[in-house]
């Protein structure tokens, strides 16, 4: 995904519904993918994205002045997904039945992803779903870019091994 400009910053700062609708239309799919990877289910991901957009509206001045808009949005949805996941901490992580029964889902890959440590799964989601650079991932997670790169590499190695060494 190329970096698309945010809707008019002034319109966001003013809280105009059309600007937030454009922001949602442009980024919701990727934000849902990131939130699902972190929160563990489609329903929790939807809750996290909903919370994120409410928070974005409430702090619209910060959003309008963000230097790296995509990293700001991903950080916001990540934080919301972590809050949702923490609220459900005592509940077992559920697999999304709709995703599991989808013909487009590769169950072997789903199982392999589930075996990854959370830190590696999160970096994979930020790299692949949000299409962030390692520098942006580092900023979102408050880790060095090299650490983000290493986690990504380790995740790919573990997936490759889990899937029988396919390249």
Image (cartoon, grey):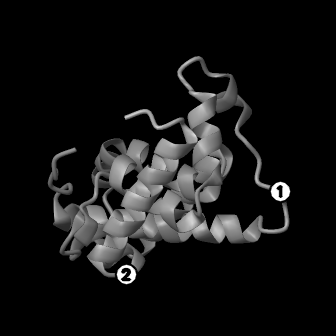
Please name the residue that numbered disc 2 is placed on: 143
13 shown above or below 143: above
**Residue lying farthest to the top in this orientation:** 103
Q: Quadrant of residue 102?
A: top right
Q: Nearer the viewer, residue 14 or 146?
A: 146
Please name the residue that numbered disc 1 is placed on: 92
The 10 Å Cα crowd at callout 2, few under 14, some 14 to 19, many 20 or more, is some
Look at 37% across and 35% down and name the residue there.
Answer: 167
Q: Nearer the viewer, residue 66 or 11?
A: 66
Residue 14 visible in the shown view: no
Q: Quadrant of the N terminus?
A: top left
Q: Where is residue 164? Give x, y as percent.
A: 53, 35
113 left or right of 92? left
Q: Nearer the viewer, mark 1 or mark 2?
A: 2
65 shown above or below 25: below
Residue 134 visible in the shown view: yes
Look at 56% across and 50% down and name the residue there.
Answer: 36
Look at 77% across and 68% down and name the residue there.
Answer: 89
User: Regarding mark 2 in the picture, which secondary structure is present there?
Assistant: loop
| Sequence-first disc among 1 and 2 | 1
46 left or right of 7? right
Q: Where is residue 128? Give x, y as percent.
A: 36, 48
54 left or right of 153? right
Look at 58% across and 56% down and name the residue there.
Answer: 116
């Amino acid at each position: 995904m190329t970096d698309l400009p945010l809707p008019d910053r002034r319109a966001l700062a003013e809280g105009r519904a059309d600007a937030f609708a454009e922001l949602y239309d442009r980024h919701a799919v990727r934000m849902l993918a990131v939130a699902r990877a972190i929160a563990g289910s489609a329903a929790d991901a939807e809750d996290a994205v909903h919370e994120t957009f409410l928070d974005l509206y409430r702090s619209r001045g910060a959003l309008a002045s963000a230097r790296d808009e995509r990293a700001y949005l991903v950080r916001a949805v990540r934080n919301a997904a972590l809050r949702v996941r923490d609220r459900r901490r005592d509940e077992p992580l559920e697999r999304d039945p709709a995703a599991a029964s989808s013909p487009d889902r590769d169950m072997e890959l789903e199982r392999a992803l589930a075996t990854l440590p959370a830190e590696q799964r999160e970096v994979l989601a930020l790299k692949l779903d949000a299409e962030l650079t390692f520098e942006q991932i580092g900023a979102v997670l408050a880790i060095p870019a090299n650490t983000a790169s290493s986690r990504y590499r380790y995740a790919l190695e573990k997936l490759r091994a889990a899937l029988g060494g396919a390249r």
